[in-house]
Each structure stands twice: as C-alpha cells, then as structure tokens.
Image (cartoon, rainbow, N blue to C red):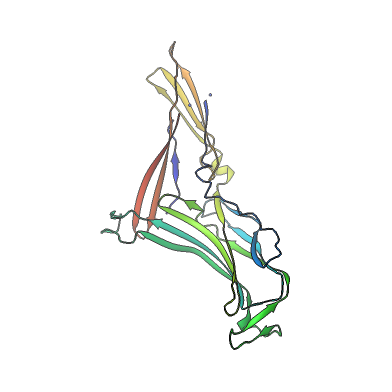
C-alpha cells in the first residue's frame, strides 16, 4: 500500500486546507497514567510520536524508548512479564473486484501483513535460579515481587524504511506496543497497550523549492499559483497562494474554486487498486 498523493491544479489570495480534523483519530496521544494506589501496569514513552527523516532509502531510522512500570500495593506472585511491539499493514479489498495481476476475482477481502515485530521478556520464572523463585504443584514456578514500583526500561531501533502510520479508506498502517504481567493460577493478569504513531518527514533541502505555476485565462486574466512546499506532514495545513492580474478593464473576479485531488494506490501480492478523492474549497 502506498502513501497518498496530493495534486493541486488551481489564486495575492491565501487559502488554508486543514486536514487536522480528518487525521484526528490517526494521531492520538495517550497521556501518562498517574501513580495509583492499586495494582496496575503502565507504559511511558519518551516520544509518543516517532519521526523518520528522509525517504526510505536515506533514513537512518529512529528509536522507540520508554519504561514499563509495575505498581504493586503488596507482595505479588508473577510467572512472567513480557512486552511486544508490532507493526501491521492491513488492506481491505472491494468485494468481487478484479485485481490487476490476479487473473481472477479475489476471495480474500482483508489482507494483513506484519512489517516489524519485537519481543521483550523482563521476568521469566521458568528460567530463574534465584531464591526468590518458587515452585508450586498447582501453578508452576513463579517469582514473588515486593510491594512498590518496579521499572523496566526498554529501547528499540526503528528501521528507516518502515512505512509511516496511515489510516485510509481501504487500508491502514498501525504500530502498537502491548505488555502483560502474567500471574500464576487463576489470578487476573495485568495488561496495558498503546498505539505508537510514526511520521515521515522530508529533508528541508528536498522540500524547499515548492510548486509554482502561472498561466493566462482567455487572454483576459493572468494568474499565479504558489505552493510553498512539495510535501506536507500529516495534520499540517496546506497553504496555497494565488495572485490575479486582469489584462482588460472592468474585469472582476467573483469567486475562486480550488479542488484538491487525493490519489491513493493500494498494492499487495500482485493486486492493485487506485482510488481518487477530491476536496473542494470555495
């Protein structure tokens, strides 16, 4: 699945196209959970949003850093404390559609693919030889953790060629970190999870030139269109500057209509579909 492309045919006028509302659900920051007097498991991220700088071929990647915090109000038994970071691409294909390269109608309407997966094990009683590890005929081995706060630091390098977080009509790219503290027997486990947003940015020198277009309408009106950058971050306002210069007398401009076209192409295992969506600004 590829990222979306914005093409902007059409005014000094200064127009803002703000996609923040559309992307509100994409970039959601989960606040740090305040300390609690009850047992709980918390995830603290140093950077809730990760930035990949440059195109995939030149990006050096970034680091996911944080802490897993286990709060206990009394000594508690645990069999295992583990955490997993997973990135997935999910594509939704229209039912009954012929896909390019497939040669037949596809039956798999939802396709899922992992792009990254990493596991941490902070405690594993089955591997322990410490005196704090115990064995039970009923629940197997476990470790007794003292009351208080237990902190486990973690760090993971994120490769620069990973796709950024995307939420589109027919597909999405998501990253999620999940942790659990497993207790022996029938006791309830502790669980916590949160999504991680990854955004790709373009180096300034690649993006500084912008887009400039000038033309004449019916030999009566000269107009210029200027877009300050070639690429914009998710959630950033798209700024378009327009200038009109009449070439005849008594010519008035009563309105301006700007259409922004988003082209989305989804590819996977020989299947391909391209969809267009337009946004009108008056």
Query: Residue 260 at x, y = what percent?
Result: 44, 36
- Residue, x 62% and y 87% (percent of image)? 136
Task: Please give the count of numbered marks on the rendered protein.
Answer: 0
Instruction: State the residue in front, 136 or 212.
Output: 136
Up-down: is 219 above or below 92? Answer: above
Query: Residue 223 at x, y = what percent?
Result: 46, 24
Instruction: State the residue in front, 15 or 245.
Output: 15
Query: Residue 72 at x, y = what percent?
Result: 70, 70
Query: Residue 262 at x, y = what percent?
Result: 42, 42
Corner quadrant of residue 107: bottom left
- Residue, x 48% and y 61% (percent of image)? 88
Instruction: State the residue in front, 257 or 79.
Output: 79
Q: Residue furthest top?
A: 249
Q: Relative to residue 28, is residue 88 drawn left or right?
A: left
Quadrant of the drawing holding the C terminus: top left
Q: Relative to residue 231, is residue 218 drawn left or right?
A: left
Up-down: is 43 above or below 199? Answer: below
């Amino acid at each position: 699945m590829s990222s979306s492309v914005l093409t902007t045919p059409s005014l000094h006028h200064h127009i803002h196209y703000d996609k923040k509302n559309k992307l509100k659900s994409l970039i959601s920051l989960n606040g740090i959970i305040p300390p609690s007097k009850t047992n709980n498991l918390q995830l603290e991220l140093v950077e809730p949003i990760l930035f990949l700088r440059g195109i995939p071929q030149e990006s050096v990647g970034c680091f996911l850093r944080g802490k897993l915090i286990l709060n206990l109000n009394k000594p508690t038994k645990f069999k295992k404390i583990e955490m997993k970071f997973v990135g997935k691409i999910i594509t939704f294909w229209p039912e009954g559609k012929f896909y390019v390269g497939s040669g037949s109608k596809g039956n798999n309407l939802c396709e899922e693919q992992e792009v990254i997966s990493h596991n941490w094990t902070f405690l594993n009683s089955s591997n322990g030889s410490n005196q704090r590890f115990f064995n039970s005929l009923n629940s197997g081995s476990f470790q007794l953790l003292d009351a208080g706060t237990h902190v486990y630091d973690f760090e993971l390098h994120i490769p620069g060629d990973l796709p950024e977080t995307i939420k589109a009509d027919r597909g999405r790219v998501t990253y999620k970190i999940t942790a659990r503290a497993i207790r022996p027997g029938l006791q309830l486990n502790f669980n916590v999870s949160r999504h991680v947003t990854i955004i790709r940015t373009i180096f300034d020198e690649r993006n500084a030139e912008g887009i400039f277009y000038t033309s004449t309408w019916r030999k009566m009106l000269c107009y210029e269109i200027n877009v300050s950058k070639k690429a914009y971050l998710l959630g950033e306002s798209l700024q378009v500057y327009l200038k009109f210069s009449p070439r005849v007398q008594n010519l008035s401009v009563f309105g301006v209509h700007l259409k922004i076209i988003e082209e989305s192409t989804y590819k996977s295992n020989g299947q391909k579909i391209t969809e267009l969506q337009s946004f009108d600004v008056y």
